Structure formats: structure tokens, C-alpha cells
Image (tube, grey):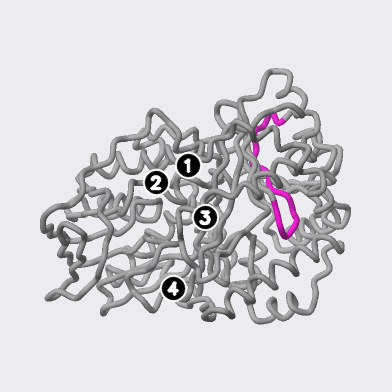
């Protein structure tokens, strides 16, 4: 909510007294047992590195394209343990981190990108049903809410722009009374409801379900098996692991925020840490006090925004606002826990829903997002087309990673498709500069975004310059 709410944060820290510092989604008795580590030499047609959504979709789609393809997947920890099991569970059709970002960067392709994104989300829904994946899939849509009068004006103007361009299908503008009729918060001033373009899922169950589907189709999965090196080997590639190695004709890299085995790709992403809280289940009275009968996902319209949704057992997930970049771009387990951010988020939560005073949080956690300078995925190949990679999803990868898997498989096959012809696929974002310039630039951008939120959305010279260069930082 508004920065002024931060002064009240300490009033609500008691709500965190019993919160466990673990991701709610992963704290599940149905969590599958890990597969054994690789302890020998494997050979295969396709090696997939990474057991998050990106790698799991790649392995699954490769087998669905051609069941004869011999596929091995290696994962450094356990499938779904990183971003794929820690996110908010917003499975969006958008491939471009929202329509506004896509229009800014690829205006000539936006209709195609929107169509491909809609088809991709439909395909995810179909795959969930076809493979019997129990992941609480609910295609409820998402409401972008305004919490300040200037944001309400911007939402109305944006809706008018969508109408003018013919891109308003399935989108509804909600005035203050209409949005509060959907979800009762005294902070809501307006909303834009995308009815079909977003589904809610249990993110860890989606990853676990994809893992089971891959195994049923014959993918050989090795967990606790980090890929250490990538080298040419004859007409293919070889990847070394702690206790063995894999020789493969082709390799797909779905490591996202973790250091890419193709070293030149590393400068295109930085890790940004995002944090979330999960409440205890709401009582019938608490549920009635907020409405939310249509169970949409919600996100507010500030630069430093919050995202929030209901779980299947009627808890509220509340995340976002802070986006923390560690100096040097290191990914470390100790960054997954940040009590000062939890306290801030708790204060913001009760500003949004004062009628829920007394509600407790049961889980509080964080995780790293692979951020790139254009906020949406980029793609490429290495080693004469024998290796493909996709990265840079910037927090919107629950759905877009399936599209990225298709792109990687197209690239490895050397096929020119509707996907590979896209400028979005053919061109990369600008890389981040080395330290200390990366940290300084990101810190200045974050300060400027917070200042814009406090000044009615007015962007300073730094943000305007970043806009012109196609750079920035999206919390």
C-alpha cells in the first residue's frame, strides 16, 4: 500500500510471532521423495538442466513431440524447490510481463504475442487435465487495483487505450464501488479485471505434477545432481556432475536465476529477492468481511507493488513490494529470510484489510527471481546450435516457461517457427553492467520508483532516461 502505511508496521508484528520461515507451498506432506543422484555415465538425445518449470516443461514437451526422444533431466536440489515452488501461483497468459511492457517493446508483434500467450495458457490448462495434475488450477483471472486516485485515472486511461487498439477482450474496468464489491478493501479506488488471462495454481504441486508426468513418459530424472561443466563431446555435448556425467546430442538449459553454463549469458540476468507471507485459514466471518467470492488474483498498481490471492484452503498469500538485489548478484540461502521485509508486509496487509485484524501469518519466505533488463524472457543457442537456453522471466514465469520450453526445442531442432521468427526471440535485452555499476544503478532506480509512488506517479529524470534506453528495474 502507500508508503505512509510503513509507519504502522510495528503495530502488526505480533501477527508474525508464529510464522515459519519456510515456503508455504513446499511445506506439504504430499511432497514427493527426491529421485536418486546420478552416479554413473548417461547418454541421451536431450539433456535438460534444471528441475523447475522451465526444465520440466522442456522435458515433457520433448517427449510429447516425439516419444522416441531419450530425455534425461538433472536438478541440483529437488524439482520445484526454488522459484517454481516459492512464487505466488499466478499463471498468466502474458509472455511479455504484461501487455504494457509488450506494447512498449514489440508493438508490431503484440497481437501475435497475445495470441501465442493465450494459446499457451490454454495448453497449460489442457496439460493439467490430461496428466491429472492436482495443482488447484482455477482460471479466475486477475484484477489490477488502484490504491491512489492517480492510479485510478491511469487504469481508466489504459482501459480506453486497450479499447482503441482492440485489445480489451475479456477485460473489464471496475470503478471504486465495483472493485470493492469484488474484494472489500477501503484502499481500493478502481480495478481492471482480466477475466481469462490468468489462472491461480498451487505452484509446488504444479512442479511436482510435471515431474510425475515426465517420469511416466520415460524421462530419467536425477535430483541432487548439479551440472558443473558443459563441454563439446564429439557431435554432441558432455555435462559433468559430482558423481558422473551425461553425454547428449542436445542440451536445454533451464537454470534461470542460477549461473548459466554458457558463461556469456550470465550478464543478462541479475537475482532479485522477493518475499511473501501466508495467513492462517480465514474463518467464515473473516471471509464474509472481505467478499472475494470470485477468487481472482490481485495486484496493486504502484511501482513497488503487492500481489495477493486466496489459496485452496482459504488462506491469503500477500507478497511483493520489496525487491532486494544483493551486491555482486550472488544467490545465497541466507537471503531467503528477511524479517524486516516481513514486518513491512504485515503492516501493509492490515492497511489493505483492517477488518482482518487479529489474523496470524503461518509462513514467511523469500526467493530469487531471474530479472533481465526488459523484464521478460530471452532465448538463444550456443555450441553451434547444440545448446539452447531461456532465462529472464522476471517473476512471470509460471506460464511463460512453457512457451520458453517450446522455443528451446524449436531452436535445438533448427526449425523456423512462428515462435522463433519473433523479434522477442531473435533479440536479447541489454546486459547489466559489472559491479559496482549494477548495484548503484539498481539502487538508484529503486529509490526513484519509491519516490514516484510518493509523488503521484511522477517519474524523475533518471527513470525517464531508463525508459528511453529500454532499461529499468521492475519490483
Residue at which label 4 appears: 421
How many marks can you see?
A: 4
Asked whether 420 falls inside the magenta stretch, the response is no
Residue 125 location (% of width, % of height): 46, 41
Determine the CA span between mark 2 and mark 1.
8 Å
Which residue appears at 67% of the width and 63% of the height? 100
Residue 346 position (above or below residue 423):
above
Q: Main secondary structure of the magenta part?
A: loop
Residue range of the region highlighted in magenta in the rendering: 292-305
Residue at which label 2 appears: 80
224 left or right, relative to 331: left
Q: Residues within 10 Å of mark 1 (few under 14, many from 20)?
A: many
Residue at which label 3 appears: 335
Of labels 1 and 3, the one closer to you: 3
Determine the CA span between mark 3 and mark 2.
18 Å
Residue 153 location (% of width, % of height): 86, 56
Location of the C terminus by quadrant is bottom right
Q: Nearer the viewer, residue 258 or 430?
A: 258
Of labels 4 and 2, the one closer to you: 2
Residue that lies at the very extreme toward the right in this rendered image: 149
Of labels 2 and 1, the one closer to you: 2
Which element is circle 1 on?
helix
Residue at which label 1 appears: 203
Which element is circle 2 on?
loop
Amino acid at each position: 500500500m502507500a508508503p505512509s502505511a510503513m509507519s504502522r508496521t510495528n503495530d502488526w508484528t505480533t501477527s508474525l510471532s508464529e510464522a515459519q520461515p519456510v515456503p508455504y507451498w513446499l511445506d506439504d506432506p504430499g511432497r514427493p521423495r527426491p529421485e536418486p543422484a546420478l552416479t554413473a555415465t548417461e547418454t541421451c538425445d536431450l539433456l535438460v538442466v534444471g528441475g523447475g518449470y522451465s526444465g520440466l516443461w522442456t522435458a515433457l514437451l520433448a517427449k510429447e513431440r516425439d516419444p522416441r526422444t531419450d530425455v534425461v533431466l538433472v536438478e541440483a536440489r529437488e524439482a520445484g524447490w526454488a522459484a517454481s515452488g516459492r512464487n505466488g501461483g499466478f499463471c498468466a497468459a502474458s509472455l511479455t510481463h504484461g501487455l504494457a511492457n509488450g506494447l512498449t517493446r514489440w508493438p508490431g508483434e503484440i497481437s501475435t504475442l497475445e495470441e501465442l500467450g493465450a494459446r499457451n495458457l490454454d495448453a497449460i490448462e489442457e496439460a493439467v487435465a490430461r496428466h491429472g495434475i492436482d495443482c488447484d488450477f482455477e482460471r479466475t483471472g486477475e484484477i489490477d487495483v488502484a490504491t491512489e486516485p492517480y492510479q485510478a485515472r491511469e487504469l481508466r486511461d489504459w482501459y480506453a487505450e486497450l479499447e482503441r487498439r482492440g485489445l480489451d477482450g475479456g477485460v473489464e474496468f471496475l470503478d471504486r464501488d465495483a472493485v470493492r464489491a469484488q474484494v472489500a478493501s477501503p484502499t481500493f479506488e478502481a480495478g481492471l479485471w482480466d477475466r481469462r488471462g490468468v489462472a491461480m495454481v498451487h505452484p509446488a504441486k504444479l512442479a511436482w505434477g510435471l515431474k510425475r508426468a515426465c517420469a511416466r513418459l520415460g524421462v530419467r530424472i536425477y535430483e541432487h545432481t548439479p551440472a558443473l561443466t558443459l563441454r563439446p563431446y564429439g557431435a554432441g555435448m558432455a555435462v559433468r556432475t559430482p558423481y558422473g556425467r551425461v553425454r547428449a546430442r542436445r542440451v536445454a538449459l533451464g537454470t534461470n536465476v542460477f549461473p548459466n553454463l554458457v558463461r556469456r549469458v550470465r550478464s543478462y540476468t541479475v537475482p532479485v529477492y522477493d518475499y511473501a507471507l501466508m495467513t492462517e485459514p480465514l474463518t467464515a466471518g473473516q471471509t464474509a468481511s472481505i467478499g472475494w467470492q470470485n477468487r481472482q488474483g490481485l495486484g496493486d498498481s504502484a511501482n513497488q507493488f503487492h500481489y495477493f490471492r486466496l489459496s485452496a484452503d482459504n488462506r491469503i498469500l500477500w507478497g511483493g513490494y520489496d525487491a532486494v538485489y544483493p551486491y555482486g548478484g550472488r544467490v545465497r540461502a541466507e537471503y531467503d529470510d528477511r524479517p524486516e521485509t516481513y514486518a513491512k508486509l504485515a503492516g501493509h496487509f492490515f492497511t489493505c484489510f483492517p477488518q482482518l485484524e487479529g489474523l496470524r501469518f503461518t509462513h514467511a519466505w523469500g526467493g530469487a527471481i531471474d530479472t533481465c533488463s526488459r523484464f521478460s524472457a530471452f532465448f538463444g543457442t550456443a555450441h553451434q546450435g547444440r545448446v539452447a537456453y531461456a532465462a529472464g522471466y522476471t517473476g512471470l514465469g509460471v506460464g511463460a516457461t512453457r512457451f520458453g520450453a517450446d522455443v528451446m526445442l524449436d531452436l535445438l531442432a533448427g526449425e523456423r517457427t512462428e515462435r522463433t521468427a519473433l523479434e522477442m526471440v531473435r533479440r536479447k535485452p541489454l546486459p547489466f553492467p559489472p559491479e559496482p555499476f549494477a548495484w548503484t544503478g539498481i539502487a538508484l532506480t529503486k529509490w526513484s520508483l519509491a519516490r514516484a509512488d510518493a509523488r503521484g506517479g511522477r517519474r524523475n529524470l533518471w527513470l525517464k532516461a531508463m525508459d528511453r534506453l529500454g532499461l529499468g528495474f521492475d519490483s
